[in-house]
Image (cartoon, rainbow, N blue to C red):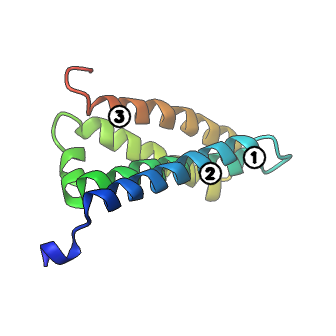
Amino acid sequence: VIDATSLGWGTRVKGFVACFAIGCLCSLLGSCLLWVPKKGLMLFAVFYTLGNIASIGSTLFLMGPMKQLKRMFEPTRLIATIVMLLCLTLTLCSAFWWRKEGLALLFCILQFFALAWYSISFIPFAR
């Protein structure tokens, strides 16, 4: 079963590049939509968050989902992972349910720093 469902290295790299490009495109689109009157900040928060989720999801192609999840929740990066996931969730909650634009922007800023902290946690001795 494992041999039949695993992807080859070339397919993994293509999936990574495609998913990462979609993530960058969503983040860029969100930045462009920031200037739309009335709904711009909400659109920015949503597209920026979706872009970050797609970018994080792109690494699933390289490592595989189970290995990535195990590494995300290792004790050395557990706090960084929780803060990052919490910021992603709170950004979407403030955009969709609470409809607080200022809060969505604050969570986008926190999301940026949380994602940077999370990414740095994968570099040995970087923290």
Residue at horizontal 36 percent and vertical 29 percent from the top: 117
Residue closest to the eye, 113 or 14 = 14
Q: Looking at the picture, which amino acid does disc 1 mark?
A: Leu
Q: Are marks 1 and 2 in contact (CB under 8 Å)?
A: yes
The residue where tag 1 is placed is: 33
Q: Judging from the image, what secondary structure is the residue with disc 3 in?
A: helix
Q: Looking at the picture, which amino acid does disc 3 mark?
A: Ser
Callout 1: few (<14), some (14-19), or many (20+) C-alpha neighbours within 10 Å? some
Give how far across and how far down residue 108 sits, in percent: 57, 38
Give how far across and how far down residue 97 sits, in percent: 61, 59
Q: Are marks 1 and 3 in contact (CB under 8 Å)?
A: no
Callout 3: few (<14), some (14-19), or many (20+) C-alpha neighbours within 10 Å? some
Give how far across and how far down residue 65 sits, in percent: 26, 59
Q: Is residue 27 left or right of residue 85?
A: right
Q: Judging from the image, what secondary structure is the residue with disc 1 in?
A: helix
What is the distance, in whole Å, between disc 1 and disc 3 at their CAs? Answer: 26 Å
Q: Is residue 112 left or right of residue 95?
A: left
The residue where tag 2 is placed is: 47
Q: Judging from the image, what secondary structure is the residue with disc 2 in?
A: helix
Instruction: Using the image, tell me which numbered label, if any, was put on residue 119.
Output: 3
Residue closest to the eye, 56 or 104 = 56
What is the distance, in whole Å, between disc 1 and disc 2 at their CAs? Answer: 9 Å
What is the distance, in whole Å, between disc 3 and disc 2 at their CAs? Answer: 20 Å
Dot 1 or dot 3: first in sequence order is: 1
Q: Is residue 67 left or right of residue 11?
A: left
